Image (cartoon, rainbow, N blue to C red):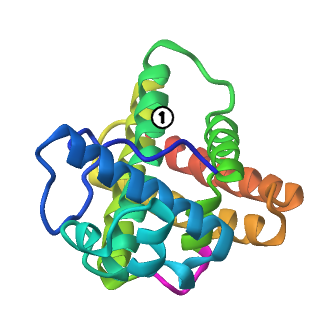
Amino acid sequence: MGDPPPEPGGTWQVPLRRTPQQARSRARLARVLQAAERVLVREGPQALTTTRIAAEAKVSVGSLYQYLPDRDAIVDALAAGYFARLEATMDDLVRAATTERWGDPVGVLIDTYAAIYRTEHGFRALWFGSSLTEQTRAADREHKRRMADGIRRILLALGLARDDEALARACHAAVLAADALAQEAFRRDPEGDPGLLDEARLMLRGYLTGVTARYR
């Protein structure tokens, strides 16, 4: 399982019925979300009920309802945490790209995220399942746009492109393609099917080489 969810009120914007104000309440909510992730990893998305999570977290169902009133709210909150972790990693890569020179940007990106997917068992359980709510699906679409913006910023930082609407569109297409390939790679093998990840690298290198060639 990955790192425990950060406490609400930080950079992680969790969709809640109400936001806890006191440190004790924030700690209780963090404990609930950590319990929800344990249940998700061990028992799957179908086990994410308020009763099961309250029992795992050793809190009353009533106290859980204050923040997460139903199963959908639990799924949305967990997904928000996973998206935030992935986006924080992208921000770190953007910062690194401003001072480093990468011979293979695609390889750096795929290797970095493959390493995360190998440890984020809860994210994979949600990602592969049919249990996502409409709110989480909408949040995922926005998440992919933010990830695409990270790719755009990396290409700009590496001096490989100029900023325009076509670059933003191409980066979004690259993220959508990479996501589909990564899903299949990790469905086949919990470590990520090596052959399919190699094909993802090959495909994305060719695509982004074509994109950056427009700016030469």
Q: Please provide percent x and percent y for residue 197.
A: 78, 55
Task: Point out the stretch of residues depicted in magenta.
Answer: 128-132
Q: Which residue is mark 1?
A: 216
Where disc 1 sits, the SS reads loop
Q: Please provide percent x and percent y for residue 49.
A: 44, 81
Q: Main secondary structure of the magenta part?
A: loop
Q: Is residue 171 visible?
A: no
24 in the magenta segment: no
Residue type (three-letter) at the residue carrying disc 1:
Arg
> Farthest residue toward the right?
195
* Corner quadrant of residue 94: top left
131 in the magenta segment: yes
Q: Nearer the viewer, residue 193 or 212?
A: 193
Identify which residue is drawn at 31% across, 51% down: 28
Identify which residue is drawn at 67% across, 68% down: 42
Q: Is residue 15 left or right of residue 117?
A: left
* Corner quadrant of residue 103: top right
Total residue callouts: 1
| Residue 8 drawn above or below residue 23 | below
